[in-house]
């Protein structure tokens, strides 16, 4: 069987101008980056036409090491819809360089459901993440420079909350003392680097509607606190203009194609823990103005990714999704039912039935947002007919069709049935989308609604100091903002080992952070990783150029 | 009078395909990045045709705060040669982001002698510097990861010489202790960031002939020393392949245009102190295969920039320049004659005559490489006819024509006379280029030749430990490499305050470093700055977007 890389290399890509024409993008709005990538002129992108498309979110069950294939399914579904004659745009996140060099694997789909050119998208692409890194670090440099030249604003160097960023997995950068070497070399203080996707600049970039909104959000970002407790923003140190200048070109969405020639907008990629984990508002809106259907994805499982997509991104951007696809695999559901990864190759109907609770709860949860659900059962060769029947019967009982998909092996044809199921849901017009909670609720109550309704927790616990901090955010004017939960993606609870569908647990909030530019409060539940490390044998060791100068080792 | 920015914005740029066609680049070798920038396919660039062009180096007198205009003159001369019907390619360095946000000013020329699009070239351009930053920092992350996972190679964490990089002026990153926070967070050690242009990756990138040479040079770079004194290279930690993959697309040269429609390759930009300070070998060679004349520039004054261009780049790449243009201004020469900057507006023939020693020595020095010289006297409105006559008469006495140029105000027409002078020198075929020293000399003797012949120093002094280190480099197999001197650019001596043409001084070598990938030994004379800081009022504070989304404040 051909590998992902072989399939990608065997594909003949169309000139990007042809893809743009198919998508309804006029030639003068196309800014080519090479022959098979382009940016779409930002003026054209934000002017948009009237929204014409329906919005389909692809989300998943709680992730397991067995793999689910959310990106692959997003691509396969988009290809299948296009093949059926529904003009469809795929909207994805840009991959981060860090994971490419860490654990083996790019983020451009797989098999016959890939976006291309794979190497470009996985590495520098059109430079958006580099622009975000630069903007983040310019603010840091200007802040430290302000401290160095007399600190007119009275910033407390111990209370600088702004961290530097790098698009790299590099644990040695997590905690440092910098500014060492004497009076001419800066101001000594504690600092650290986050991976670029965890930067608030990334979240702001993905939520901004246009350039003025981008600059306003950048200006509102809080970098530090003064000795007398006032917040110091990027605007206070006059960094917002130059940051916006650095991000100007990046804000134009990127157009690429799938191996089957569907247009795909791949733009933005915020972390799904400390931020909201979905592609840019600019790209999604552009897609909706051009296509009849936009298929997009959100990070992690539906409890985290879809909830944030719906409560943060859709609310902020005024988007109303029309349907939701939940991706599951029989292998992963068996893990939720207690099977170890090594034993997934054997039929195990009992374990599968036990693990179905995870999928069932995600399906029910999506109903709480008023969304019709289709389950995409991403096929593996080890799946048995009896196992497939278990999933389909359980879903039918919930009124949610489960469709077996083989787009990894078969491309669009393998997702045709899924596409028809989605079409039926869209045609039925069943969606009555509403966010989960009223934005006017106090922050703690919003968190409470998410914990009870989505995680099935019995209660939220937070130390008095954390509760007081939430109170202070509200006094500062940040009451009517959504809450972005940072917790493990592996469980509905805050305990990564509790698979299936735990209930009655406690959600412990360790810390809260205000992302004033992005416009949300982050509730940190448990450990939060904002700078990954490399494994003992990083994928980077196997990456290199072959004799023809092609890049090996990215898959 | 129109500002640089107004002139740049008023210009109508041609589609980059048209510029490529003028330059003789076939359409299928053009990789567009937007409408007015492109990369040239690396296969086409390195295959080249036979060298057909003559190579003209633009260099300068010792720089002063009065400004000389080397880049502007390189562009003006290229435009003028093209206007006269000589098919000319301009080869420039890419600007660094750091200085853009620090002291006001981009690096794309000025007045009517600019390359465009100015904002793009000054900011992210085609992402080359970001790729170099990523490659540099991937090596650092892999090295620290090696330490973290057991340190099989036995690296001494105190002897890691590889520093991280960022394309930013940020003094707080110069010296740090990272890897803090406990056993799971890395290995604590001292580290620091250099600005990207000071990274050895940048030097390697600019000296590499093609991808295999790039990867081989990356692999040879020394990152650290083991406890028992062995060098640890990038190949030892298996970082070279992934670094080459990150740099693959960047190695393709960038094509842009001048405001008058001349083609310009803007590619690479190593620091002129710790590295050799000129654009990429790939771009220069491509230019020579396409054009009848290539005009290029080197950093700092001719004592540093031209010397390294000739002894390092030309030697390594097998290039033989045909003529040399030395840029001078009457203002700067008066500063070399003792006039303060505030008093430069007044005629002062005596001071000018005194300052001429600086120009005279640079002209004589270039003769030591067998190169004919033309002096470009870059006109200012305050220059008087008597002053111009002083320069022209002194140069005529040396057999070196001095030509008054007004390309800043007049574009190509203002450099037409300069272009004709260069044409005459090229037609006369007077160049008998040879490097200054025999590469087989011991390292200390090579340094001695540069110090005596170029700087007119009486002697080179180095502590015994430094001399022993040079000896050790030779034992390691790095004897037949050139020496890259890092010293102040403001004086022929190591003392920045000694303007004019000091003689008989001592050149103190404080430290020597081996750049095994770039293929040279750096002799550090005096302070060396590899991470600049921002000024009290950084230019970044004035940079921003105007109502039409254009970038203000970059000039």
Image (tube, coloured by chain):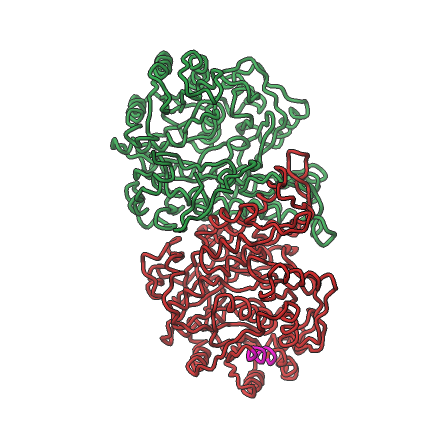
Chain colours: A green, B red
Residue A516 appears in view: no
| Image height of A451 relative to B249, above or below | above
Residue B213 appears in view: yes
Q: Is residue A73 magenta?
A: no
Q: Would you say A416 lies left or right of B37 here?
A: left
Front residue of B364 and B226: B226
User: Where are the magenta residues, as a range?
Assistant: B360-368
Q: Residue at x 65, y 52 (%)?
A: B171
Q: How many marks?
A: 0
Quadrant for the N terminus of chain A in the image: top left
Residue found at the far left of this picture:
A85
| Image height of A20 relative to B71, above or below | above
Choose top left, top right, bottom left or bottom right for residue A504.
top right
Q: Residue at x 58, y 55 (%)?
A: B199
| Image height of A93 relative to B83, above or below | above
Quadrant for the C terminus of chain A in the image: top left
Q: Residue A108, how many percent across, how many down?
A: 41, 37
Q: Residue B187, how many percent across, how many down?
A: 66, 40
Q: Would you say A304 lies left or right of A407 here?
A: right
Front residue of A88 and B541: A88
Q: Residue B137, how many percent across, how many down?
A: 56, 47
Choose top left, top right, bottom left or bottom right for residue A460.
top right
Q: Residue at x 48, y 17 (%)?
A: A339
Q: Residue B120, how many percent across, how many down?
A: 46, 55
| Image height of B288 relative to B140, above or below | below
Q: Is residue B361 magenta?
A: yes
């Amino acid at each position: 069987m051909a590998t992902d890389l072989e399939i990608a290399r065997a594909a003949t890509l169309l000139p990007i101008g042809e893809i743009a024409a198919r998508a309804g993008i006029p030639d003068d709005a196309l800014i080519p980056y090479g022959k098979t990538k382009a940016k779409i002129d930002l003026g054209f992108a934000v002017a948009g036409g009237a929204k014409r498309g329906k919005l389909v979110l692809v989300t998943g069950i709680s992730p397991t090491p067995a793999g689910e294939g959310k990106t692959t399914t997003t691509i396969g579904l988009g290809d299948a819809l296009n093949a059926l004659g529904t003009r469809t745009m795929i909207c994805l996140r840009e991959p981060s360089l860090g994971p490419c060099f860490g654990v083996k694997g790019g983020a451009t789909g797989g098999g016959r459901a890939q976006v291309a050119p794979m190497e470009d998208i996985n590495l520098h692409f059109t430079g958006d993440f580099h622009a975000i890194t630069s903007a983040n670090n310019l603010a840091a440099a200007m802040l430290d420079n302000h401290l160095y030249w007399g600190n007119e604003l009275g910033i407390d160097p111990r209370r600088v909350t702004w961290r530097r960023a790098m698009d790299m997995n590099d644990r040695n950068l997590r905690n440092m003392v910098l500014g060492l070497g004497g009076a001419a070399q800066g101001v000594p203080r504690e600092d650290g680097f986050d991976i670029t996707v965890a930067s608030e600049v990334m979240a702001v970039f993905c939520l901004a509607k246009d350039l003025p909104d981008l600059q306003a959000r950048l200006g509102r970002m809080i970098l530090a606190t003064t000795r007398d407790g006032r917040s110091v923003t990027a605007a206070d140190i006059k960094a917002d203009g130059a940051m916006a200048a650095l991000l100007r070109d990046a804000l134009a969405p990127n157009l690429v194609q799938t191996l089957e020639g569907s247009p795909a907008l791949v733009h933005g990629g915020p972390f799904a823990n400390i931020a909201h984990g979905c592609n840019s508002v600019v790209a999604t809106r552009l897609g909706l103005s051009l296509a009849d259907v936009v298929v997009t994805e959100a990070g992690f499982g539906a409890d985290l990714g879809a909830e944030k997509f719906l409560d943060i991104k859709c609310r902020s951007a005024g988007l109303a999704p029309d349907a939701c696809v939940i991706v599951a695999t029989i292998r992963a559901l068996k893990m939720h039912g207690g099977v170890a990864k090594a034993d997934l190759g054997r039929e195990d109907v009992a374990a599968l039935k036990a693990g179905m609770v995870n999928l069932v709860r995600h399906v029910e949860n999506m109903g709480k947002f008023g969304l019709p659900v289709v389950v995409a059962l991403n096929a593996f060769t080890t799946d048995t007919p009896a196992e497939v029947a278990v999933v389909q019967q359980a879903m039918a009982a919930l009124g949610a069709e489960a469709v077996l998909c083989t787009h990894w092996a078969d491309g669009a044809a393998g997702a045709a049935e899924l596409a028809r199921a989605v079409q039926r849901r869209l045609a039925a017009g069943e969606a009555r989308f509403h966010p989960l909670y009223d934005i006017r609720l106090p922050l703690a109550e919003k968190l409470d609604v998410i914990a009870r309704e989505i995680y099935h927790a019995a209660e939220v616990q937070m130390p008095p100091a954390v509760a007081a901090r939430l109170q202070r955010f509200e006094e500062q004017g940040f009451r009517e903002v959504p809450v972005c939960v940072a917790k493990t993606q592996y469980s509905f609870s805050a305990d990564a080992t509790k698979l299936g569908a735990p209930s009655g647990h406690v959600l412990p909030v360790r810390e809260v952070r205000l992302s004033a530019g992005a416009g949300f409060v982050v509730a940190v539940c448990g450990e939060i990783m904002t700078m990954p490390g490399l494994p003992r044998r990083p994928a980077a060791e196997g990456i290199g150029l072959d004799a023809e100068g092609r890049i090996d080792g990215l898959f």
